[in-house]
Image (cartoon, helix red, strand yellow):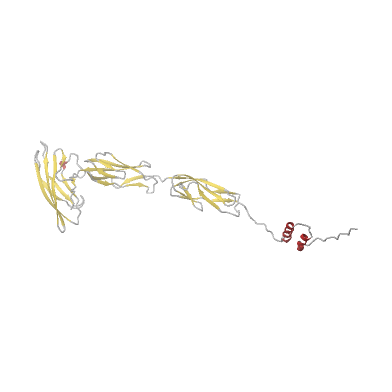
Amino acid sequence: MLKKRKNISKPKRESMLAIVHFGICTAALAATIVLLGCADKSVDHSVDFIPVQNAYLDKTQISLQIGSTVQLVAAIEPANATNHNVTWSSSDSSVATVSSTGLVTGISEGTATISVITEDGGHAASCEVRISPINVTGISLDRSTDTVFIDSAIQLEATVEPANATNQNVTWSSSDSSVATVSSTGLVTGVSEGIATISVTTEDGGYTASCEMMVRPYFLAIGIPYIAVDSLTVTLNYLVINETASTYTYSINYTLVNNTADQAIDEGSFKMYYSDTTGGVPQYGFFGKLFPGNSRTRSYTFEELKSKPFGVLEYHHDNFFSKRPLDESLKWKVDISR
């Protein structure tokens, strides 16, 4: 005769391990039941996280000059989204860069895309940035006229305007390279007697400035005659420099020859300047009228203080030139070391 099974009472939450003991459920189920049973229903464990749904920029296209900056502003929707962190980037940092706060800087001519992306959700927005150069507005030279001697050189300085123009490239040219040449850096060299116009032109905009350059001869060597015009030959015979404690004494000897058959050469003068034509009163030597076919040799002595730099010797008279130089003079550079 079967015994009547006793009713087993439902265990309390505090005694869930007893369920396992009695074989009513597995240990895993028991653990789940324990966790559920121990939960405090009086506490709300949910988090108030508001996700980002979209991102925008205040500008979608901008134009900027090289070296200039512009601030981009990013907006996130909804405005009360929990995570507002974003990352900025440029598609070409050689054209335009962007800071961690959205400040865009133009680097070189071209186009770049500035993007911002949200940390939450990876929502992105972008702005196309076109970087343009700073255009040239003009050019100037440090002088408009000057004089250079044959086989000597003068440096011209060009200034592009504005000073921060992107393209500073210029091209130099001479109106007559048989008279004067000019290098790619503006160094002018005298080639033969005459006048040439030296010009500089900007690559950007084609702006031009020019300098009228007069080229004059040197007597670079003793005993080499110079034909001033068809009627007159001048030869520097010798130049002696005597040095004392405070002065240099220059003894100069030259010969004039009148090569014409019917024209007399009027009286003229020979001068020495210490540094230039504005540096005080020159010292003179004179010669008389020179008749056709005649020659005359003259010697003169000049004295200068050592404190004054030796400048130029000048042979001066209106009749010496078929095309008169600006200051009506022929300047001799004496290439003698002290």
Image x and y of residue 287, in percent: 10, 45
Residue closest to the eye, 121 or 24: 24
Give the residue furthest to the bottom: 14
Query: Image height check: is 260 above or below 275?
Result: above
Does residue 314 show up?
Answer: yes
Image x and y of residue 48, in percent: 64, 56
Query: Image height check: is 86 above or below 226?
Result: below
The image quarter containing residue 174 is top left
Image quadrant containing the N terminus: bottom right
Query: Image height check: is 104 above or below 257?
Result: below
Image x and y of residue 310, in percent: 19, 52
Is residue 55 toward the left or the right of residue 285 in the image?
right
Give the residue furthest to the top: 261
Is residue 54 toward the left or the right of residue 66 in the image?
right
Residue closest to the eye, 8 or 90: 8
Image x and y of residue 78, in percent: 60, 51
Residue closest to the eye, 124 or 14: 14
The image quarter containing residue 43 is bottom right
